[in-house]
Image: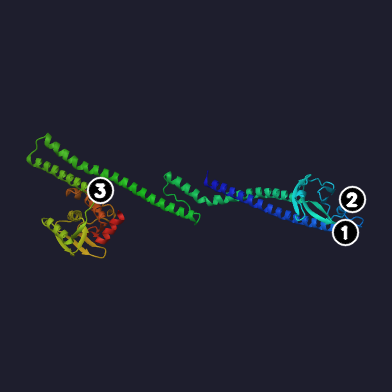
């Protein structure tokens, strides 16, 4: 069952119960009030009749010491004939509670009479001959006699009014329930509209329409739920796009890897087949062997870089405090044999919180790329400086530079700006991809500035220990 129907059904049930109890209470309250008023009037009337009977008995000529039965009947007949209303009947009984006089139609039992005594006035409501009556009973003292006077007052109108009240109430209840159902149906539809919109959005997203968003139609909790759902949808769409980008990147990676393997393998197989199938002179043999060696070294470098990337992605770096000066001294010692370039080192002495071997790998790759991008004899600057953000490492060359449209792609695996130049120097397009992975572990990233023909400056900032620990806490 739909939520709106559940809400409608519950509301109608509550409305029916509320109307039922309230109507029953109201009608009965009016009935009890009217019946109480009639009882009061019947008791007062009985008292008046008692007084009238006693007065009439005092006016009887004193022939006898005791009031005679026929005199009682005569007085009772006169009282009935001169009654205040046409819906009154009376009955008189003697001391032994034997009937002396009764109006026509006064056919009730003696139950009330037996409960009446000198000190007690009684009354009850009875149903007789399709009418409702209030029967009252009291004693009358007349000329040394104690008589019992009973009256019947017709109150059928009060009961008819109650029945009419219930009948009208039932009709009103039915009308109110119908109107309430229609109104609550509209209200339930309005209240559940955000839920229907969310359901529609969920189905659209399940069908693959990740751009679809639920429309917010209220500012209450359901409206907030709609906002939260849209935020979730945006996050989901972003994650799906990332996954699609990663899948595409992996496909591109596999394609590039296959392409990168094909070229050196083709050369290796071709020259190996030449050496195997025919006898070559010494110069051609050396040339073929050199091609095989060069392409083999390129394959070796590519496999090592790929392994480093995989290890970096899945490994755990062991951070420690390292003197930045030691890192620069290591680079100085490693590249001192490269006399084709002019290296200039300038750095601040400071302590950095890094995994030293990984950072050295980054610096070596950046320096190696700077050498490959520069002509022999060019200047390469290696710099380090302390700042508010942390310690900044910078490698700057004055080589051929990188076109602006290529800057966003150079950190992708196997991407090379100048493929022929990179292959001639055993490049595989994996160095910057490896650097990006390593720096990500350190909470840093490459910052590249380059102009074609003027050179390239690549830098990265290692956060201080406090910021590094904060980064690790957030990402774990």
Q: Quadrant of residue 398?
A: bottom left
Mark carried by residue 314: 3
Q: Residues within 10 Å of mark 1 (few under 14, many from 20)?
A: few
Q: Position of residue 26 (x, y in %)?
A: 67, 53
Q: Residues within 10 Å of mark 3 (few under 14, many from 20)?
A: few
Give the secondary structure at mark 2: helix
Q: Is residue 456 visible?
A: no
Mark carried by residue 70: 2
Q: Is residue 166 left or right of residue 271?
A: right
Q: Is residue 2 left or right of residue 333?
A: right
Q: Residue furthest front?
A: 65
Return the residue at label 1. 58
Q: Position of residue 162 (x, y in %)?
A: 72, 50
- Tell which circle, 1 or 3, labels the residue nearer the N-terminal end: 1
Question: Which residue is pictured at 42% across the width and 49% down the height?
Answer: 211
Q: Position of residue 372 (x, y in %)?
A: 18, 53
Q: Is residue 87 left or right of residue 6?
A: right
Give the secondary structure at mark 3: helix
């Amino acid at each position: 069952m739909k939520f709106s129907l559940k809400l409608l059904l519950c509301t109608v049930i509550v409305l029916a119960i509320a109307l039922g109890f309230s109507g029953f209470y109201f009608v009965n309250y009016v009935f009890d009030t009217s019946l109480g008023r009639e009882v009061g009037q019947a008791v007062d009337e009985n008292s008046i009749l008692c007084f009238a009977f006693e007065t009439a008995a005092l006016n009887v000529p004193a022939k006898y010491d005791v009031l005679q039965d026929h005199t009682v009947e005569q007085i009772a007949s006169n009282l009935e004939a001169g009654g205040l209303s046409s819906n009154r009947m009376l009955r008189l009984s003697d001391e032994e509670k034997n009937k002396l006089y009764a109006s026509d139609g006064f056919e009730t039992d003696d139950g009330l009479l037996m409960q009446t005594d000198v000190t007690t006035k009684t009354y009850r409501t009875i149903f007789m001959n399709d009418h409702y009556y209030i029967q009252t009973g009291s004693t009358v003292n007349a000329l040394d006699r104690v008589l019992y006077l009973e009256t019947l007052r017709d109150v059928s109108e009060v009961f008819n009014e109650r029945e009419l009240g219930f009948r009208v109430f039932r009709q009103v209840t039915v009308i109110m329930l119908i109107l309430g159902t229609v109104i609550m149906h509209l209200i339930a539809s309005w209240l559940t509209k955000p839920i229907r919109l969310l359901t529609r959005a969920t189905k659209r997203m399940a069908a693959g329409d990740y751009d679809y968003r639920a429309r917010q139609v209220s500012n209450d909790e359901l409206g907030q739920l709609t906002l939260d759902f849209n935020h979730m949808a945006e996050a989901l769409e972003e994650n799906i796009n990332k996954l699609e980008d990663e899948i595409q990147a992996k496909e591109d990676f596999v394609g590039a890897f296959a392409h990168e393997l094909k070229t050196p393998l083709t050369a290796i197989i071709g020259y190996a087949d030449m050496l195997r199938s025919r006898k070559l002179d010494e110069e051609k043999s050396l040339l073929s062997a050199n091609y095989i060696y060069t392409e083999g070294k390129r394959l070796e470098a590519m496999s090592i870089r790929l392994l480093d990337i995989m290890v970096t992605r899945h490994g755990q770096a062991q951070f420690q405090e390292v003197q930045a000066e030691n890192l620069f001294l290591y680079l100085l010692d490693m590249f001192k044999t490269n006399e084709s370039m002019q290296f200039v080192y300038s750095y601040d002495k400071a302590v950095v919180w890094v995994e030293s071997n990984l950072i050295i790998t980054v610096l070596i790759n950046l320096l190696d790329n700077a050498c490959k991008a520069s002509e022999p004899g060019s200047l390469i600057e290696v710099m380090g400086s302390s700042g508010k953000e942390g310690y900044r490492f910078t490698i700057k060359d004055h080589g051929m530079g990188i076109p602006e449209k290529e800057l966003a792609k150079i950190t992708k695996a196997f991407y090379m700006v100048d493929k022929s130049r990179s292959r001639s120097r055993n490049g595989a397009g994996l160095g910057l991809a490896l650097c990006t992975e390593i720096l990500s572990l350190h909470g840093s990233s490459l910052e590249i500035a380059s102009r074609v023909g003027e050179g390239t400056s690549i830098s990265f900032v290692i956060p201080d220990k406090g910021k590094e620990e904060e980064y690790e806490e957030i990402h774990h």
